[in-house]
Amino acid sequence: MSYAELLDTMGQVNDLLNAESILKWDARTMMPSGGTETRGKQIATLAVFARDLLVADQTRRLLDGAERETAGAGEDSVERTIVAQVREAVDYHLAIPADLQRRRAELGTIGQRIWAEARARSDFQLFLPVLEETVEINRAMAEAIGYSEHPYDALMHRFEPGETVSTLRPLYARLREVLVPLVSAIARVEPPRFDFLERHYPVEKQHAFALKLAESVGYDLGRGRLDETVHPFEVSFTRNDVRITTRFYPDYMPASLFGALHEAGHGLYEQGVDEAYTRTPLATDLVGLYAVGGVSFGAHESQSRLWENHVGRSRPFWQRHFPQAQATYPEQLGDVSAEEFYRAVNRCRPGLIRVEADELTYDLHIMLRTEIEAALIDGSLKPRDLPEAWNAAVKRDLGLDVPSDRLGCLQDVHWSSGQIGTFCNYTIGNVMAGQLFEAAQADGEVAAGLERADYEPLRRFMGEHVHRHGRRYGRDELLRRATGRALDPEPYLRHLSAKYRELYALGDAA
Amino acid sequence: MSYAELLDTMGQVNDLLNAESILKWDARTMMPSGGTETRGKQIATLAVFARDLLVADQTRRLLDGAERETAGAGEDSVERTIVAQVREAVDYHLAIPADLQRRRAELGTIGQRIWAEARARSDFQLFLPVLEETVEINRAMAEAIGYSEHPYDALMHRFEPGETVSTLRPLYARLREVLVPLVSAIARVEPPRFDFLERHYPVEKQHAFALKLAESVGYDLGRGRLDETVHPFEVSFTRNDVRITTRFYPDYMPASLFGALHEAGHGLYEQGVDEAYTRTPLATDLVGLYAVGGVSFGAHESQSRLWENHVGRSRPFWQRHFPQAQATYPEQLGDVSAEEFYRAVNRCRPGLIRVEADELTYDLHIMLRTEIEAALIDGSLKPRDLPEAWNAAVKRDLGLDVPSDRLGCLQDVHWSSGQIGTFCNYTIGNVMAGQLFEAAQADGEVAAGLERADYEPLRRFMGEHVHRHGRRYGRDELLRRATGRALDPEPYLRHLSAKYRELYALGDAA
């Protein structure tokens, strides 16, 4: 009885969070500019109502009752899992003082405006007070949430439960060990031809072609749609309405293409969550207060990177799809071969900007950010010393000098809105994608499918081992069930080494 | 203190209702078909939360306090008005038993499906149980809400506060006295040429032209947008985000044009509400639980009909804009004069379908529906006898035989979703539009502006006398302030008689 009522209440929490997501999607895709201020208030009200309903006295009474009711069920049962997740989320939110929440919400509004100006003017001193406030609020939140070893662990928990500074350290060391020399070797080699990617590509054609590829990997338009935004994203309002966006540059075609494939990968995850989990905590992030079916931000990123990179940037993919691209763009690609196209979309080059980074250098951008965040939170790095630390890390890992803070530590939006703890997800996602893709390819049907551009066996493998489970299992449990072991960087590193050594004719691994 | 907190709470009610409106707009314009079921749940949750917040114990404590705090303010002050409106809404919602609300909500889902099938098959017997349930629920609601004279008054209150069966009776009698003979006289005259309206008009051109006309009357695209839907509508999410839709028929151009002008008229009302009223009860219908700035459905309709008919179907309008139409559609309108176009878009012809009715016959459709609804509610008409009563009224007022219930009493969606009491708004809106337009034209600047297709003086007049007040004054008080008297059909009838007698060369009024 209590359990059933608790599920009803969690259904309402899910409804409110989905409504919030719809308002945010609309704000980024459809809303006239005049709506900004009142839309912000509407979103804030929905967030407050969702949180308040989750921790309400009545909800907690139902939770107590549900714990008693389900005590007899197996520890691993859906019922016990749901009840435990609600308990964890209630405790989490009650631990954070209202005052801290308020300060963080206020910072979000002001901080982004100041950051935008500071970045435009490359003026770190202008941004420094915002950064100091962000760090202070997040340190206080870490203390409130609690942790065993490192305060940064408490902040990562919301995005990547279970990940800690001490689990990341050996992972990052191993990644750097392979990536840094590989990137540096490639930087000394002549890059492939890529002029044809910068020809004029009409936006309407790009839209149709991006949509066609998204559909070809299994993204269901009966439960989705593709729109244009400055920054591509995916968002779901239950598995039955999962939307993606991409960006269109008339003179740089890969942006729309790989943006759409990346977001379609996220979309497949959400569209594939077990229908029975709809509106339950197994399709709601109650800690992050976000209506999402994926189990962690890293797990989500594994699906986007898998379809973007392991599939979409593979040679078989372009052997199959380049003729379609050529037919769509006869003038732009008439003098290009499939092999040239494949090499161009895999061009590797160390750069200063994270969001423009290629498959091979992306993790180097991520790792330095995670480490800087951890150091800001444990106090070993003072906010005022950020530019120096940033520039040193970029020099060390990417071999580049940072000419201005605009192209350095002011480039990302995250810190301006009070968010600390989320960067590691991108690298976790890459590592997981490598691990899952290797496991999937051991299935003969998947491998054979990929060779003939039939993505259904791979999508079915991911559906079976990842998507359908929603938030039923933790990330490492999910990985163990799918691949036989927890997070392991070796498959990913094998993939990168083999691919880029062949592409740049570097010979066998050093 | 209590008053300020009450305003905060009402701001949240407004946020929730606006969020509900956004979800509904999205469902009609953007949502993939798969989202229907879960979207319905999200909308239902928002509606429940808005209603529950309005009548919550804490809200009522604030209301009690606010009444004491504002007792010293003038009776007509904004503060007293707001407090009185909240009190009225709280009492209204508490009077309706939860069971009745639940039955009505359930009926909405099933009823529409059954109605759609019944209409397709023209099978009244299939729809009869839904109609009986609708009537029974609405009779019970009328008893719960309360009334002085007629139970139907209680149902109209939500849409047109203050309107009653006994105020409608003389109004309708007067309208019929003029309209019925006029329509019947016109039916005997040769209709104007209109073949060119049914040529092929590309949808993209229609979209651009409709948008241009909407902007020309003052609709602000910085706080709005135009989309396509099967049934045109306007919806606002505060005055800063007011959206309109229209429909596009490739072979019937007036639909998109007058649809856009009509909805732009609604849009001007919402965009023009005093900014200080944003998120307050003066821009929230707390009785209807709908985030709207207009004071009644009839008042809203007055603005849409004013711009659609008094402006958009006037001779000066097409003298000015026909050259633009001709330049947009040189092939379709090359052999047509401005005068022919003006006459074609004012073609009058009694028909069976309300939504296709012209300016002159529209009220005849409305009045018979209102009277049938009132009779169903007071029990003088049994649901099973509806077709007979309907067909008799159509014969009497429009001179037509109804060949099937599909083209008769099954044509409207309203009753299938449990809604009774809203039809009179359309006619009230027409009458108000006539009255307000006549008052506006007494202003020399307005009249001069219209002659040179400058709509700014008229928009300013409506902004000053109608839009900015939001829900500050009741409809008749608003009319008295704007025109010197309460609702009066004579200006509207003068407008119709003069226009149609001239168009159809009928000579002076009988």
Image: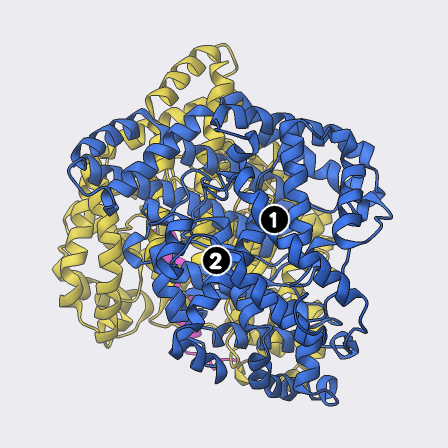
Chain colours: A blue, B yellow
Q: Which mark is residue B233?
A: 2
Q: Residue furthest front?
A: A510
The numbered mark at residue A130 is none
Quadrant of the image occupied by residue A344: bottom right
Relative horizontal placement of residue B394, taking residue B249 as reference (left or right): left
- Asked if B13 appears above or below B425 in the picture, the reply is above
SS for callout 1: helix
- Front residue of this view, candidates B24 and A451: A451
Q: Is residue B154 visible?
A: no
Q: Amino acid at mark 2?
A: Phe
Mark on residue A172? 1
Query: Mark 1 is on which residue type?
Result: Tyr
Residue A461 in the image: state x and y as whole percent. Answer: 38, 68
Image coordinates of residue A148 in percent, x first then y, are: 48, 28
Q: Does residue B173 show up magenta in the picture?
A: yes
Q: Residue at x 66, y 72 (%)?
A: A508
* Residue B131 sits above or below residue B70 on the image: below
Chain containing the residue with disc 1: A
Query: Residue A214's spot in the image, x, y percent?
Result: 52, 72
